[in-house]
Image (cartoon, helix red, strand yellow):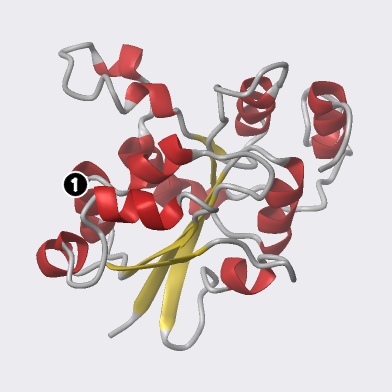
């Protein structure tokens, strides 16, 4: 069987339980299955095992039994996440997958360097951060897909799709299209970027530093 990996990272400095719960529900599993994903690999932080248990994704779980998705995870890798991100790259026995990341600039840059589809999900619970602005700007520039957790809760609310925006299942589907038109990193700033700032400029302006 050809493997196809969806790697999700929440980062090391702040809990992002909402992102974990968003990728451990049936809507997301159904989308993974429809797009022929085989593996959901999670960097889940200290609360990960508890959330997996709450979502009934431990041992012989519904993810494997109903959707054929192998769910595995770990707290954090102190040596970095390069190996996990590279597991989403196409190889002889593997189709190209996707990285779903919090909006930390370090994680964004790591994913862009290996040139795979990237979905960035801002953690809106953090105070005094500009993650939403960063994700929106980089999405406009064509580097990534902006995923929005708040719209997951509205998925069955009856709101029109354009108001719901891109919940994670929709963002995952969009990433399949996005892989055909990925912007190269490092960027070519000779007119390709209409804002004139480039990725580094956006990160400096929106976040003030690299993390």
The one nearer the camera, 6 or 180, is 6
User: Residue 51 location in percent, x, y?
Assistant: 35, 49
Residue 22, quarter of picture: top left
Q: Give the answer, above or below, for where 70 lies relative to 210.
A: below
Label 1 Cα crowd, 10 Å radius (few <14 / some 14-19 / many 20+)? some
Residue at 69% over, 27% down:
134
Marks counted in the figure total: 1
Residue 166, quarter of picture: top left
Q: Give the answer, above or below, for where 189 lies relative to 44.
A: above
Quarter occupied by the N terminus: bottom left
User: Residue 135 location in percent, x, y?
Assistant: 62, 30
Residue at 42% over, 87% down:
93
Quarter occupied by the C terminus: top right
Residue 116, quarter of picture: bottom right
Residue at 68% over, 64% down:
114
Relative side of 13 to 85, left or right: right
Relative side of 13 to 32, left or right: right
The one nearer the camera, 154 or 112, is 154
Outermost residue to the left: 66
User: Residue 44 location in percent, x, y?
Assistant: 50, 54
Relative side of 120 to 13, left or right: left
Which residue corresponds to mark 1?
26
User: Residue 171 location in percent, x, y?
Assistant: 40, 39
Q: Give the answer, above or below, for where 5 lies relative to 147.
A: below
Q: Is mark 1 on a helix, strand or loop?
A: helix
Residue at 67% over, 47% down:
183
């Amino acid at each position: 069987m050809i493997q196809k990996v969806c790697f999700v990272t929440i980062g090391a400095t702040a809990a992002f339980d909402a992102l974990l719960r968003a990728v451990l529900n049936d809507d997301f599993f159904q989308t993974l299955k429809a797009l022929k994903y085989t593996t959901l690999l999670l960097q889940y932080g200290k609360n990960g095992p508890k959330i997996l248990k709450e979502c009934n994704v431990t041992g012989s779980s519904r993810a494997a039994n109903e959707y054929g998705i192998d769910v595995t995870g770990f707290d954090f890798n102190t040596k970095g996440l390069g190996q996990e991100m590279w597991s989403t790259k196409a190889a002889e026995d593997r189709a190209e997958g996707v990285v779903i990341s919090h909006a930390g600039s370090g994680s964004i840059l790591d994913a862009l360097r290996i040139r795979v589809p990237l979905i960035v999900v801002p953690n809106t619970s953090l105070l005094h951060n500009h993650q939403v602005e960063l994700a929106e700007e980089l999405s406009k520039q064509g580097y990534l897909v902006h995923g929005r957790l708040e719209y997951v809760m509205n998925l069955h609310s009856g709101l029109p799709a354009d108001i719901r925006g891109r919940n994670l299942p929709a963002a995952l589907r969009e990433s399949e299209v996005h892989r055909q038109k990925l912007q190269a990193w490092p960027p070519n700033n000779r007119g390709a970027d209409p804002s004139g700032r480039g990725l580094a400029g956006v990160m400096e302006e929106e976040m003030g530093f690299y993390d």
